[in-house]
Image (cartoon, helix red, strand yellow):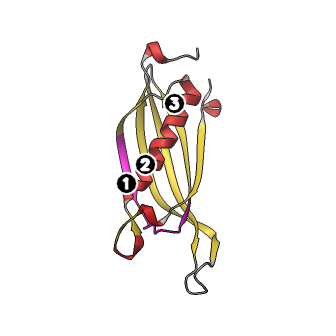
Amino acid sequence: MSDQELPTAYIRRRLGSEDAHYGGNLVAGSKQLEIVGDLITELAMRHDGDEGLFRAYGSVEFLHPLYAGDWVEARGRIVRVGSTSRTCEFEVWKIGGPRGDISESAAEFLDEPILSCRAVGTTVVTKENQRFSR
C-alpha cells in the first residue's frame, strides 16, 4: 500500500448542549479528542480490519474554542505504518454554528472554516489481529 493509498477518515457533527462543560456553553477539549479517538479507530479498521488500541498522542494543539451548537468537521489520515504501529494526523475544524444574534434557531455555516484542534497520535494493531496482508 503506497502513501497515496493509506486510509483517511472523516466525521461531521454538531456539538450539543450535552457537550458543553464550562460556563458560556464552552465545550471541553476532551470532546475533540473523543472525535479523534473515533477517527483513529476507523483508520485502524480500514487499514488492518481491527480497531487497534490508541497508544499515545505525539502532540495535541487546541487552537480555537468550540461551543454548544457549533458544527465541526474532523479529518484523520495514516501518515506512517510500522510493523504494528500506525501514526496518524488529525484536524478538527469549526464549520458552522448558531446565530443567536439573529434568532433562537438561526444558524449558518462559515465561509472559511476555523481550525480548532490539530493532533498526532499512534495506534497499535498486534500482528495476530492484522487481517489484511500488505
Per the rendered image, the range of residues in magenta is: 57-72
The three-letter code of the residue at mark 3 reads Ala
Residue type at numbered disc 2? Glu
- Quarter where residue 120 is shown: top left
Binning the other alpha carbons within 10 Å of mark 1 as few (below 14), some (14 to 19) or many (20 upward) gives: few
Mark number, residue 76: none
Decide if residue 49 is on the left or right side of residue 84: right
Q: Are marks 2 and 3 in contact (CB under 8 Å)?
A: no
User: Mark 1 or mark 3, which is nearer the start of the sequence?
Assistant: 1
Question: How far across and how far down the image is residue 81, in percent?
Answer: 49, 27
State yes or no: residue 18 in magenta. Answer: no
Question: Magenta stretch: residue 65 in it?
Answer: yes
Q: Residues within 10 Å of mark 2 (few under 14, many from 20)?
A: few
Judging by the rendered image, the residue that carries numbered circle 2 is 34
Secondary element at tag 3 = helix
Q: Tell me whether circle 2 and circle 1 mark residues in contact (CB < 8 Å).
A: yes
Q: What is the x, y in percent for residue 104?
A: 57, 82
> Which residue matches tag 3?
44
| 3D distance between C-alphas at marks 2 and 3 | 16 Å
**Which residue appears at 47% of the width and 17% of the height?**
129
Viewport quadrant of the C terminus: top right
Q: Nearer the viewer, residue 89 or 31?
A: 31
Label 2 and label 1: CA atoms lie apart by: 6 Å
Q: Is residue 69 above or below residue 134?
A: below
